[in-house]
Image: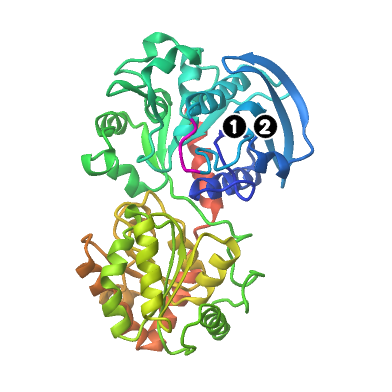
Amino acid sequence: MQVLHVCSEMFPLLKTGGLADVVGALPTAQIAAGADARVLLPAFPDVRNGIPDTVLVAEIDSFAGRVGLRYGTYHGVGVYLIDAPWLYDRPGSPYHDQSMYAYPDNHRRFALLGWIACELAKGLDHYWRPKLVHAHDWHAGLACAYLAANGHPARSIFTVHNLAYQGLFSAHHMAELWLPSSFLNIYGLEFYGQMSFLKAGLYYADHITAVSPTYAREITQPEFGYGMEGLLQERQRQGRLSGILNGVDDKIWDPSHDARLAARYDADSLKNKAKNKVHLQKAMGLQVDESLPLFAVVSRLTNQKGLDLVLEALPALLDQGGQLVVLGAGDAVLQQAFLAAAADYPEQVGVQIGYHDAFSHRIIGGADVILVPSRFEPCGLTQLYGLKYGTLPLVRRTGGLADTVVDCALENLADGTASGFVFDDCDAVALGNAIRRALVLWSRPRHWQHVQRHAMSLDFGWQVAAKEYLSLYQRLS
């Protein structure tokens, strides 16, 4: 089974969010399961520098000029790079400049990604030709449209990592992109007078997956569908929409082998986890006391993540003796509010603005509870890291959070299935109640450790997802 993953980022070469983690791990797991999986990426500077040894596969005229296709390997995975420096060799993120303005030619930059995917399916590389194209998020959505326009030289899957990001562009750009004008239609990629790269993926793919079963159901509803719910309801009725839960890369996230931790540990040596807690308290200038429950946030600071609710619930958490560590960046108002809390409660609240991968490991290894109170969460990886590290997740019941965390209700504690704390209503009262329940369990160390050990025993490895995807590929072939 030759599979081409089409995406804009890949961990650890380039990462702005969870998409990169998925693409960094899923192809490797699929190769281990017997597939011939490769990845197509734009040659952004960090990607090109991370794969310096490449060979030129082809040069081809495109709507964006003459471009090169290069091929190399990265940690055993074959990677194709689109060599078009006038499009991709820029400062800032893959999507916007250093002033956070989206690049005005993003429609061309990411349409080219989809177009090259189709050309590979048509045989651009004479030595390898994908039978299935797996496009990820809006950046790769046009891959499915180009395949449809060319009579489906390969089958296609489109994975929704976050439906909120839709890749909307002015309809007048359509003429530049070598797509049939008939595709700019309500039965195509037109969306309220604009063209939507996301809708292109949803409409033209042979099958759609979301990154958790619950999110796959949620996006068929107006609350989560962002105007696409009608199309998604139709795909659901046709059996062309399903959810496959993301996984955790065990080579990167494993407390028994994590060199970033002050002390490594496993479910049988939880005393060593406390050493990480003391190290974290010292690093953040907090009161050093193993007995104090330490809560953590490792997240983009955005409205979606429900972090305004954390700020509302924070006084009660601190009054009950809790501590809070925050690592993240994003909304300026949220950043300032967390920094103000750290200034007001220096022994109880520690905040670091920005994202540092190594420090995220030290926080998740040292904290007792990881907070993920999202308004919506397609899958979520942070709670999975928390489970793996015995840092109990406290989450809202939505998307992948609902699929992965079992609440510490009495019946779940009794039958040994509890793995964290779950609340339903999206408000600070419900979050505060969940925090209180966490503190009650914290006061019973034997029960707390029992839940920790169960959480650490759960298997959310990529091998499970890889097999599910391969089964889906085979059904489509």
Image side of residue 453 versus residue 87, left or right: left
Q: From which residue to which does the magenta span run?
A: 99-103
Residue 80, numbered label = 2
In the image, residue 348 sits, relative to residue 380, either above or below, namely: below
Do the residues under discs 1 and 2 have CB atoms within 8 angstroms? yes
Q: Position of residue 177 (x, y in %)?
A: 49, 16
Prevailing SS of the magenta stretch: loop
Which amino acid type is marked by label 1?
Leu
Residue 278, numbered label = none
Q: Residue at x 77, y 40 (%)?
A: 52
Q: Residues within 10 Å of mark 2 (few under 14, many from 20)?
A: many
How many labels, in total? 2
Q: Position of residue 28 (x, y in %)?
A: 63, 46
- What scheme was used to colour the molecule? rainbow
- Name the residue furthest top: 181
Image quarter of residue 310: bottom left
In the image, residue 194 sits, relative to residue 228, either above or below, namely: above
In the image, residue 317 sits, relative to residue 30, either above or below, namely: below
